[in-house]
Amino acid sequence: MTQNSPQTPVLQIANVRHSYDTLEVLKGVDLEVHRGEVACLLGPSGCGKTTLLRLIAGLEQLQSGAIRIADTIVADARGSVPPEKRNTGFLFQDFALFPHLRVKDNVSFGLIHQKPEQRKEKAQAALRRVGMLEYADAYPHQLSGGQQQRVALARALAPEPSIILLDEPFSSLDTRLRSQVRDETLHVLKNSGVATVMVTHDPEEAMFMGDKIALMNRGVIVQVDDPVQLYYHPVNAFVATFFSDVNRMEAVARNGKVDTPFGTLEAPDIADETTVDVLFRPDALQLALPQGEDGGVSAEVTASRMLVGSTLVHLRLEYCGPSCPMHVHARIPGRFPHPDGSRVSVTLNPDQVFIFPMESGDLSEYTPQHCLKATDQTVYC
């Protein structure tokens, strides 16, 4: 089987462990990436994702485990292949373009062992691929941030590497430019067919870019899957809370069910008398004006905030059993027409609820840093 076969991983990481002094930052990581696949390493600061990327690139000395690129072991207990011989392209956060070289010379810099005519042809082909051929004679300071990023991508692609490594490649760009540039970058990477590993701390960016996402926490990969599976089928509370804001309730499982203010929910795989976290995202709530016995929970609108394409509505539930009063968030499409102080009926879509045994009484065990805990145990972000 050749290395270009879709069944053969271009990158194989097996049981990689790494420590800085007494701090173990990687604790037995396994990962595979195939040709044409964009894999995102995602997680909070300090989870080990950048260390893993540097080990793949050869910028850190592997301490334990093995790394294989394109059917060649580049690092294991016996030794390590130097970074320049691993056939990888690396795109840094700051692009690392040489200010004294023209664009064409920056792109051809990694082709020094090839004949001049080959260098020229490959550099032009790489610039054409990213739409920057007309800027071949310009200097980096004459380009915008987005143009510099595309030149850096062309330089990484020019040697035709087995794998491209991207370290927070859009973090230095403003919000509007970031969206445009990452869209262009994704098209270039997919058209090139190269295997890609990208580090990011932004869940939305990972979901946009990644064919699969390896979500990391405390030195381990908690779940590796495609974005849809991660979002709708998280394996634990950390995964569920990492990809969006959540509302949280504490409950107890009995007879395969959990009683909540929104009704009884199914929890067939959880043992009786287990204390559980009931998590649901703001868009799992539906709001309507009260209409008698509509099956919803009565709530007061305490605030509403218009966002891009939706409105985040803050609600106070007052008549919903022992959990009340409770503060929850709902996200509805478009504009919310009702003023603060209005009464609405709230229903919950049970298909968008995640129930997990409580891992810890401390929400910080799995709640992202941008989320806060209210005194009523509701998480809001």
Image (cartoon, grey):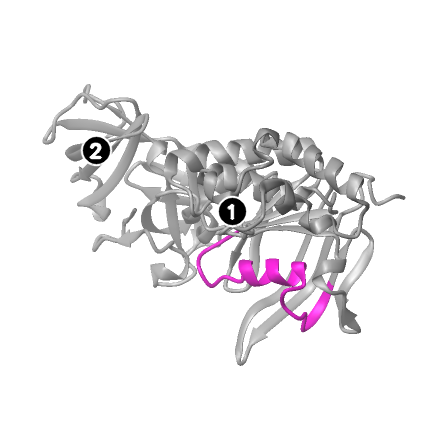
Name the spot of residue 338 as percent of width and height, x first: 15, 23
- The boundaries of the magenta stretch are 42-66
Name the spot of residue 257 as percent of width and height, x first: 42, 44
Q: Is residue 124 left or right of residue 220?
A: right
Which residue matches tag 1? 169
Which residue matches tag 2? 305
**Which label sits in the foreground, 2 or 1?**
1
Q: Quadrant of the N terminus?
A: top right
| 159 part of magenta stretch | no
Q: Secondary structure at mark 2?
A: strand
Name the spot of residue 336 as percent of width and height, x first: 22, 24
If you read the primary sequence from the N terminus, does the residue marked by circle 2 or circle 1 appear first?
Answer: 1
Q: Is residue 52 left or right of residue 34?
A: left
Query: On the image, which quarter does residue 128 sit in?
Result: top right
Q: Secondary structure at mark 1?
A: loop
Q: Residue furthest left?
A: 341
User: Is 47 or 60 nearer to us in this picture?
Assistant: 60
- Count of marks placed on residues: 2
Residue 341 can be seen, yes or no: yes
